[in-house]
Image: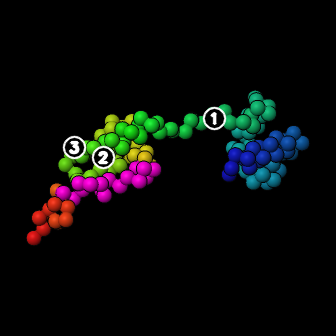
Amino acid sequence: MGSGLLRQKQTLFYLLQADGLTWAEIRVKLDCSDSYIDRWSKRFASDRLAGLFARHAGREPYKVTDRLEARVLARTTKHKPADGSTHWSSRKLAAELGGDISHMTVARIWTKHGIKPHLLEGYGRHCPAYPEAGGNRE
């Protein structure tokens, strides 16, 4: 349920409660549970109309800084994975960068810049199955 609809439901709850309806009547009109009625009754009793608003505004959205983007791009294009793999995976790179970045953030940065680590120059050089990349397939 969107926050606008939730706020409408809470406001309607307050109005129904102010009109003196019973919990059973409110439950039917709003299609809600007793725990919902109890929670919002207590919140209204303690906070009045301010109780309509969330107590916890949430956290700020994660922002990828230019510096972090540069670290991801530099590491992807200038270094090879320490485990000897031919190319980076988003999880390997996130782990290598010290865990201060998630693999999903790495993947988003790659997508934003059109980077496909498995297609970077040098991929396949160590793979004997691909002679066009420098391997010896016989």
The residue drawn where x is 41% and y is 40% is 69
The residue drawn where x is 63% and y is 34% is 56
- Dot 3 falls on a residue whose secondary structure is loop
Residue 77, disc: 2
Kind of residue sitting beneath label 3:
Ala
Give the side of residue 29 with respect to residue 77, left or right.
right
The residue segment tinted magenta is 110-125
Mark before the other along the chain sequence, 1 or 2: 1
The residue drawn where x is 31% and y is 42% is 75
Give the side of residue 4 with respect to residue 89, left or right.
right
The residue drawn where x is 79% and y is 54% is 28
> From the viewer's perspective, is the residue at label 1 or at label 2 nearer?
2
Label 3 to label 2, Cα distance in Å? 14 Å
- Dot 1 falls on a residue whose secondary structure is loop
Q: Residue 127: in sight, yes or no?
A: no
Classed neighbour count for the residue bearing mark 1: other residues with Cα under 10 Å, few (<14), some (14–19), many (≥20): few
Mark before the other along the chain sequence, 3 or 2: 2
Of all residues, the one furthest to the top in this rendering is: 46
Label 1 to label 2, Cα distance in Å? 39 Å
Kind of residue sitting beneath label 1:
Ala
Of all residues, the one furthest to the right in this rendering is: 19
> From the viewer's perspective, is the residue at label 1 or at label 3 nearer?
3
Please tell me whether residue 134 belongs to the stretch shown in magenta: no
